[in-house]
Amino acid sequence: MLVDFNELPDNARVWIYQANRSFTETEINEVKDSVTEFLKEWTAHGSQLQAGFEIKYKRFIVIGLDQTTASASGCSIDASVHFIQSLEKKYNVELLDRMNVSFKQGEYIAYKPLKDFKKLAKAKSVSPNTIVFNNLVATKQEYLENWEVPACESWHARFV
């Protein structure tokens, strides 16, 4: 069951999928429609899942799940991964590769393989104050408070 992302409780589970490029406006509208349709039908053991989403910076798909009524099961998580894989194919983007880092360079969002991010840090092209996206956050509250943070406040700190 689709719910407004903002209405999800702070302890809602979140998954963040970062794209290796920005979506176009047309693609964003299509992705929103696709995610909406998927979440309307998303279930775990026959129970409707109360989930919402948002798209940030034209490249992050953030899905939140209120687990107070029903939790995601292995099968429902598999279904969401298959859905995300279908978006990857349709739009020729990477959404599931966790070995890449997104960070801000001014108003621009950079996307680099982890090894390149390490090189940038070593060359002082990124600093402890560089704003990074910590896609490992697990709840809506963590997402709101600790997703977009200086590298020194994230797992990225070991590189800067």
Image (spheres, rainbow, N blue to C red):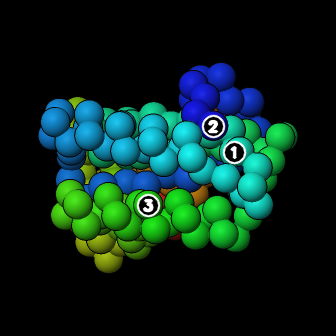
User: Which percent across, then down, holds residue 18?
Assistant: 37, 54
Residue found at the far bottom of this picture: 115
**Between discs 2 and 1, the one toward the N terminus:** 2
Dot 3: element: helix
Rounded to the nearest angstrom, the CA distance separating label 2 from label 3 is 16 Å
Residue 100, percent across and down?
Answer: 36, 67
Residue at (48% x, 48% y) in the render: 38
Q: Residues within 10 Å of mark 1 (few under 14, many from 20)?
A: many
Q: Position of residue 75 (x, y in %)?
A: 66, 69
Residue bearing the label numbered 1: 49
Q: Secondary structure at mark 2?
A: loop
Identify the residue shown where x is 26% and y is 40%. 30
On the image, numbered disc 2 is attached to which residue? 1
Nearer-N-terminus badge (3/1): 1
Quadrant in which the C terminus appears: bottom left
Residue in the foreground of this view, choosing between 120 and 55: 55
Q: If you read the primary sequence from the N terminus, does the residue marked by circle 2 or circle 3 appear first?
A: 2
The answer to whether 133 is drawn above or below residue 11 in the figure is below
Report how many numbered discs are placed on residues in the image: 3
Percent x, y for residue 120?
Answer: 26, 65
Q: CA distance from mark 2 to mark 1?
A: 6 Å
The 10 Å Cα crowd at callout 2, few under 14, some 14 to 19, many 20 or more, is some
Residue at the location (53% across, 60% down)?
80
